[in-house]
Image (spheres, rainbow, N blue to C red):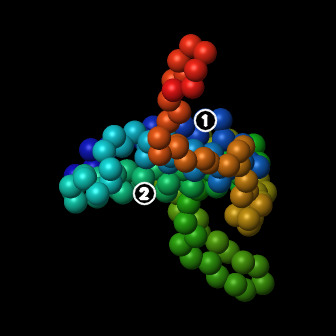
Amino acid sequence: MNNIEIDSDTVLAAAEADTLSGDIRDALLTHLRAIRVPWAMLSEEEQAEHIAAISNTAEHAVRRIVGLVAGGGMPAVIGTISKFTVKNDIKVEFLVSSLVANICALAEHGKASAVLVLSSAADFIGEHAPAKPDPNQPDLPMQEGKAA
């Protein structure tokens, strides 16, 4: 059913750490502004397609950006802690997708020490500028020498 796609790689290519929330907002607003009819006039299916597209973009953006921020410019892999045990030390099993980028990053890193980074999303709430709605009625073109 999801026929609508946003290229979030392109939209978020210029994302910066201190403006992430604004960059995500702008990516989503780009999609919303492309809807040419009022929301109420869209069929339930069309609304569901737009909701799914925006949700997928938001999830993709968050995953990419968390990797960007947490990695701090260093190679990073995103995965799931599937199990950990506590004895004298803590042993962690970390599952990642078998993507070429993950395989390369892990192979290059090898068995060397690694850092598990924990951060707060509040550190990345910002924007380049506030979003402004379009006026209900655009300004009328001015006639020569007189206001319209």
Q: Residue furthest top?
A: 144
Residue 127: % across, % down? 71, 49
**Quick check: can you spot residue 100?**
no
Three-letter code for the amino acid on which mark 1 is drawn: Ala
- Residue nearer the viewer, 129 or 125: 129
**Quick check: can you spot residue 142?**
yes
Is 63 on the left-hand or right-hand side of 123?
left
Q: Dot 2, crowdedness within 10 Å: few (<14), some or many (≥20)?
A: few
At 66% across and 41% down in the image, what residue appears? 15
**SS for tag 1?**
loop
Residue occupied by mark 2:
55
At 25% across and 53% down in the image, what residue appears? 41
Three-letter code for the amino acid on which mark 2 is drawn: Ser
Marker disc for residue 13? 1
Is 89 on the left-hand or right-hand side of 10?
right
Residue 37: % across, % down? 31, 45
Is 110 on the left-hand or right-hand side of 59?
right
Residue 53: % across, % down? 37, 50
Marker disc for residue 129? none
**SS for tag 2?**
helix
Give me the C-alpha separation between circle 2 and circle 1: 19 Å
Q: Dot 1, crowdedness within 10 Å: few (<14), some or many (≥20)?
A: few
Total marks in image: 2
Dot 2 or dot 1: first in sequence order is: 1
Residue 63: % across, % down? 56, 54
Q: Residue furthest front?
A: 146
Instruction: Determine whether 8 is above or below 92 in the image.
Output: above
- Residue 101, quarter of the rendered image: top right
